[in-house]
Image (cartoon, rainbow, N blue to C red):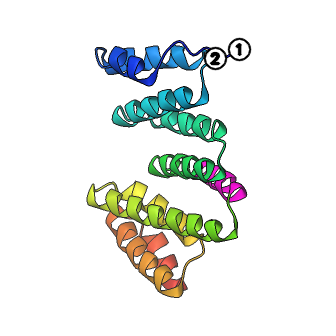
Amino acid sequence: MVYTGITKSEIESIIQKKGDFMQIEYLSDLSRKALPVHVKKFIYLKLANIYHRKSMFKEEARIFDLLALNSVAFSERVKYYVKETEVFIRTCRFNEADTTMKKALREANSIEKEEIYYSIKDFYKKVADDYVKQLKRNSATKVYEKLLNMRLTDFEKEKIKERLIELYEKLGRFNEARRLEGLN
């Protein structure tokens, strides 16, 4: 039997009186109960939002995985797997990002597969550019190195190589810069 004794609005009114970590505790406890799927999704989305605000990315990714598993529609599953992939990319956990991207691709049709791949590739570029702007050069090089292993046009590859060479030189990694220049 499904427990239906609490609504979204009741949950909302209860958590707005609490701090972030108390909200996490309350929502986590509530998520373990047998609730209707739409209420569980609401709880998971609230948790994901809090985890994102608190930079608790590992937990945020776990919640997106749970959201995907609780989704009936393939498009929703794909959406949540893509969000989980983006969280892993933001934290430079590329193996997990690849695994989650494969989950999204398995759930998608042939047209959506290309869209997913290109949106994730664009997200890698955006994250790398953000790291450069924040002067997180080492993280940016990791993301650009990962991008080089993806399907790219020749123009994109050249542009990424140029950025990598520049970053390698700024980081004092001259051997890698020379090696990459030799590939041009």
Of tags 1 and 2, the one toward the viewer is 1
Residue 110's x, y, as percent?
69, 69
Is residue 145 visible from the viewing direction of this image? no
> If you read the primary sequence from the N terminus, does the residue marked by circle 1 or circle 2 appear first?
1
At label 1, counting other C-alpha atoms closer than 10 Å, the crowd grade (few under 14, some 14-19, many 20 or more) is few
Report whether 79 appears left or right of 70: left
Residue 9's x, y, as percent?
39, 22
Residue that label 2 marks: 34
Residue that label 1 marks: 1
- At 66% across and 42% down in the image, what residue appears? 72
Q: Which residues are magenta?
A: 95-107
Residue 120's x, y, as percent?
52, 62
- At 66% across and 51% down in the image, what residue appears? 74
Report whether 135 appears left or right of 49: left
Contact between labelled residues 2 and 1, with CB atoms less than 8 Å apart: yes
The secondary structure that most of the magenta stretch takes on is helix
Q: Secondary structure at mark 1?
A: loop
In the rendered image, the quadrant that contains the N terminus is top right
Question: Which amino acid, by three-letter code, is at mark 2?
Answer: Ala
**In this orientation, which residue lies closer to the viewer: 52 or 33?**
33
Residue 24's x, y, as percent?
43, 20
Instruction: Check if residue 177 falls in the magenta segment.
Output: no
Q: Secondary structure at mark 2?
A: loop
Instruction: Give me the C-alpha separation between circle 1 and circle 2.
Output: 8 Å
From this view, report whether residue 44 is shown above or below residue 173.
Answer: above
- At 40% across and 35% down in the image, what residue appears? 49
- At 60% across and 29% down in the image, what residue appears? 37
From this view, report whether residue 72 is shown above or below residue 112.
Answer: above
Question: Which amino acid, by three-letter code, is at mark 1?
Answer: Met
Query: Residue 163 appears in which quarter of the rendering?
Result: bottom left
Is residue 34 visible from the viewing direction of this image? yes
